[in-house]
Amino acid sequence: MRRVELKRLVLGCAAFLLACGLSVPVGAQEPVDALKEQLREMQQEMGDLMKRIEGLERKKAETERVESVEQSVKSIQESPSILNPSIGLAIDTTFESRPDTDGEFNVRSVELGLSAEIDPYARAYTFITGSEGGIEVEEAAVQTTSLPVNVTAGRFFADFGRLPQFHQHELPFVNTPLSMTRMDMGESLGTGIQWRFLFPTPFYLALTGGVFNEIGHSHAHGATGHDHEGEDDHEGEDDHDHEGEDDHDHEGEDDHDHEGEDDHDHEGEDDHDHEGEDEVHADEGGSRSLKDLTYLGRLHAYFDLSETWNIEVGSSLALSPRTEMEEDSRRSLLGVDVTLRHRPLVPGFYEGFTVAGEWFVNSQDSHDHGTTTARGGYAYANWDVNPELPGKWSLGLLLDSAPDLHHPDDTTLSLSPYITWAPSEFNRLRLQYTHGWDDVGSAEHDGSQLYLQWITVIGSHTHGFRERR
Amino acid sequence: MTSSFTRWWLRAALTLSLVLLLAGPAAAQKIGVVTTIPDLADITRQIGKDRVSVRSLTLGVRDIHSVQVKPSMVSLLNRADVVVLMGLSLEHAFLPALLDVAANPRISRGGIGHIDTSSGVVPLGPPETLSRRGGDVHPAGNPHYNLDPVLGKLIARNIAEGLSKAHDEHRSFFMKNLQAYTAELDRRIAGWQKAARSLDGVQFVSYHDNWAYFAKRYGMRQFGTLELAAGIGPTPAHIVQLVERMKAARVPLVVYGTYPSRLPQRVAREVGAAVVPAPLYVGGRPGVDTYVKLIDYLVTHVSKAVAR
């Protein structure tokens, strides 16, 4: 359309100028020649302009074609993540040498992760974990993405503490700290609903609330190497207490153990560990009163102290108004976590430092046995270094203090130096030595232990914001 | 005991929550923009001027591929009207996870405040096969197009159009600023083109493959990378081979950005090449606080190094 108008304009101008030229008196031949010359020049310029316009139009068409192709390519590239879930697989294998075994290889877990957006309002994800003990749906949850409050529902890691929310293969060291396992929070797995509100403050401050059937690790998942340890602990405690304690303590022990197992196992135990647990679950039926649920609260803040330093602090509370084994017993678990990080602006040999710890207070009130309070926790320091060798390297030291929940004065202490080498983001090897000093009576945690861990990831694998380092 | 510390905890949490809710910041008058890299922050400021308040999630001295995910980023994104990103999977390691928990549908993908500046960019070097054998590949192609100033104009246009779409009442203001900034870039681009004549045909080695667009603009030829593959660090065997090849081909230049300096300097020393700690983003070197200064620094310092 523009080309036609331009042509008309050129022709109009030419006609006008020609008319002007013809109307010039005969005596003024020189100006006429000048005008004719100007006309020729203008026609030439117009011709050039037309060529330029045609060139630009061709270029524009080419650009449009490129943009169209680009859009198609983008659509094709992005369609798998839109129409199909992202799929990833993480394999966690270990070689372990402990006091109770000279050495054994374990495939601790094979974790298949699927995640996708459901619609503009929510996303869903699941982690299906297989181990030598079987297969379980470790997480299956839906999470809102468009509400002012993040709501998560299903089976998932409750927002309790920091490392309890990590899958075991994402921990900075080989094993879940025994203090976490003893507090029945090896992982904060639970079935329920949780909401997180972000305060409109200049710094990060979030408040989480939640209601769950229970929060804690399922024994079904505990078929992995480490979690056998957790089970063994209980067994060890039983043996220890049966032998050395009076009747009263014996009763208390049973109460605790049953309760602890209930807290852990309500979900997975039914599926995988029927033996010995039928009595516990026989009277659960299909309904619960509100007192039988576990209530969660967490306040979590983060501050950038400078461009290189930051600190994260949190406090969590899980409250069970009535435990299942005793009508009038109640239980609470308080956790406080602190994480301090440093990352230099200019990396060299030293690339960063993290020091973190969590302290737990487990308290159980019952009419018959009064209050039993156990305190324990862990702390670790991790240095990222670049020794100019392939991959990423880090060195760390973990200190763990895990009390016996029934006899809080008895504790298992352990110190674990470890070194991690990641040839790439998806491939990680770790060597860890642990020395334990055990008062509780679990022989496997007393003395020297050696672990070699190899974690590999294929496909799209991410646990997102929750498991940030 | 249980009830006493439970009550204490609940009281403390509720009191603090109430106080902070009441003391929360008043609604901001400006358009809140969060960008992923400082280059986008500077260009957004040129377009939005005093009508925008801009924060970048990352610093220019950091490696964009290993950004530390911080909760403070969630707070910024939660309050943002607009997020501006490079796209082409450059931010895949941190942005999707942050947007999932930011609870801000306005800036999520497909939202009106989600501006992907790669629109219209023809990516260089898309992988022939999508496999991690090639390292941490970017499926859509090389995402480091910010180092081409001509594509800088496209970034500015995409930002202006995105801001106008999200805030149509300021459209004429943004478009007028875009025109002025584009004219400024055009003038600079002509100057940079002249200043970078000596770079034509120059071979170079970089730490990571983030110089492709700069190299194409000024006719440089990427000889190799110190990394074995994208996101896979250098290995001794790879470096030995690379050094031998560089010596044979007389490669005169090694550039590195946000990466550790010892290896590039050692390789340059062994080969007899010049080495330039060239910034990859605005803020990557002292004084490089705008996009224009970034390109200016690169053209000037790389040209000088080659001339030597």
Image (cartoon, rainbow, N blue to C red):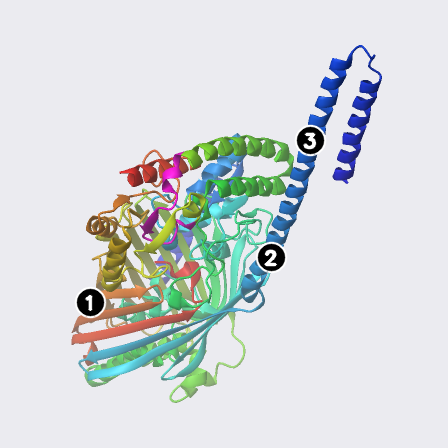
Residue under label 2: A69
Mark 3 → mark 2, Cα distance in angstroms:
37 Å
Amino acid under disc 3: Gln
Label 3: how many residues lie within 10 Å, few (<14), some (14-19) or many (20+)?
Answer: few
Who is closer to the viewer here, A154 or B269?
B269
**Between discs 3 and 1, the one toward the N terminus:** 3
Mark 1 → mark 2, Cα distance in angstroms:
55 Å
Q: Does residue A78 show up magenta in the picture?
A: no
Have a look at marks 3 and 1 and say if they share a chain. Answer: yes
The chain letter under disc 3 is A
The chain letter under disc 2 is A
Label 1: how many residues lie within 10 Å, few (<14), some (14-19) or many (20+)?
Answer: many
Q: Position of residue B221 (x, y in %)?
A: 38, 50
The N terminus of chain B sits in image quarter: bottom left
**Between discs 3 and 2, the one toward the N terminus:** 3
SS at badge 3: helix
Amino acid under disc 1: Ser
Residue shown at 68% from the left, 42% from the top: A54
Residue under label 1: A416
Residue shown at 60% from the left, 59% from the top: A72
Who is closer to the viewer here, B117 or A153?
B117
Name above or below for residue A272 compared with residue A435: below
The chain letter under disc 1 is A
Q: Position of residue B32 (x, y in %)?
A: 52, 40
Q: Which mark is residue B270?
A: none
Residue shown at 45% from the left, 59% from the top: B138
Mark 3 → mark 1, Cα distance in angstroms:
86 Å
Q: Which residues are magenta?
A: B195-212
Residue under label 3: A44
**Between discs 1 and 2, the one toward the N terminus:** 2
